Image: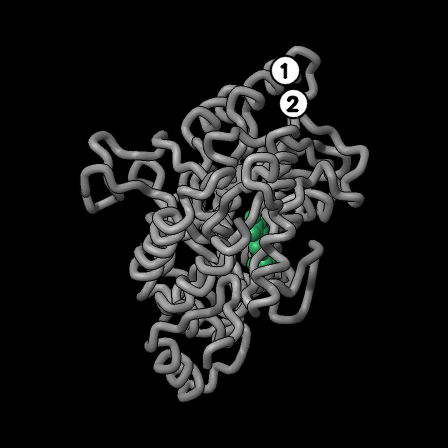
Amino acid sequence: MKNERIFLSAPHMGGDELEFVKEAFASNYIAPLGPQVDAFEQEFARKVGAKYATALSSGTAALHLVLRYAGVSDDDEVICSTFTFVASANAIRYQQAWPVFIDSASSSWNMDVDLLREELRRRAEIGRLPKALMLVHLYGQPADIDPILELCERYDIFLLEDAAEALGATYKGKAPGTVGRAGVFSFNGNKIITTSGGGMVVSDDLDLIEKVKFWATQARDSEIYYQHSELGYNYRMSNILAAIGRGQLRVLEERVERKREIFAAYREALGDLPGIEFMPEPEYGLEAGGGRAGRSVEGESWATRWLTCLTIDPEIAGVDRDTVMRELEKHNIESRPTWKPMHLQPLYEGCEVVGGKVAEKLFNKGLCLPSGTGMANGDLERVIKVVRGCW
Ligand SMILES: Cc1ncc(COP(=O)(O)O)c(C=O)c1O
């Protein structure tokens, strides 16, 4: 069909998912937990290079429970990127703590390390260090983890990585999400792999993983009867959804390749338009000599390009982001603005923010183009034609 809708990032099944779902049906584990969940956790941990993993109902639930493990509670402060999806900040509020937002670096769109360093130095002087730091890896691109890890170690701050959007990326050969005390991933419908909804916590700390599992299954004490000494949640992943996840995990590398191909095609076809700038890919995450983990390809880089993101400067382009979005919509093509920074959200009015102008600019000018790995090249051409037509 000529004018079929093109979605931002539609689910893309690999083929094996149904076999695992059939296994789940055959075993009659149509339940939360079961052998598919155990297998998905083990396979996922192996894939990202973490010791342990636990599968939950969403990435948001995962962020919440890790913050609880970090001891974050009433009126504590947690550092967080301002340029992120609201779930990162909401998890902080679930624990009655307060986010302190840090601006992005324009070279990566992720947390600005210099601003963070200065803010922590200032806070150390006045004895007001945050309890934890939520480091977001945005749009498939790792933040500059090493200097941030060093700061967290220096000031004894719990480092939680929100890698919801960054599965498949590498940072100096490691998966983002495996460097801090814990990492969180999301499998909602638009992520690089999906279980329709779900999340994962990974860590090398067995105590953390066991505690998260315990809270996620209603915190039931080890008694023969139902006894509860702590407040728990119903946050575990179902056995059926884990079966989908196992199938999806098998095609992760292919999905990364295709995401990067899509990005390259857009850049090739649109890069000459005045006023367009694509999300940069800084080199801080490359291994010596370049290359992804396990595949030393000279010059190859390491972000997944989960979504192809760009900015449009209306003064140079003669057209603004919203007009381009409207034009795409007229042609039945879904696109999205980049995240609205947390410090501009009515929900977070009054919260502290360090800087903020970079994230504001990225929001005012930023656009995410359709980036689904199931898109045919003809779909890409349709998008490109409409965007070019706006200039
Ligand atoms: C940066 C970020 N953090 C957290 C989440 C929350 O994940 P979920 O939708 O699985 O709760 C998402 C995605 O939705 C996200 O993009």
Checking the image for residue 5, the label placed there is none
Q: Secondary structure at mark 1?
A: helix
Tell me the kind of residue under disc 1.
Answer: Ala
Please, is residue 268 above or below residue 370 in the view? Answer: above
Quarter holding residue 296 = top left
Rate crowding at label 2 as few (under 14), some (14 to 19) or many (20 or more) other CA atoms within 10 Å: many
Rounded to the nearest whole Å, what is the CA distance between mark 2 and mark 1? 6 Å
Please, is residue 115 above or below residue 256 in the view? Answer: above
Picture residue at 46% right of the left edge, 30% below the top: 107
Q: Which residue is mark 1?
A: 124
Picture residue at 47% right of the left edge, 69% below the top: 11
| Residue 68 appears anywhere in the view | no
Q: Which residue is mark 2?
A: 129
Relative image position of residue 345 (x, y in whole percent): 75, 43
Relative image position of residue 269 (x, y in whole percent): 38, 51
Q: Residues at badges 2 and 1 in contact (C-beta under 8 Å)?
A: yes
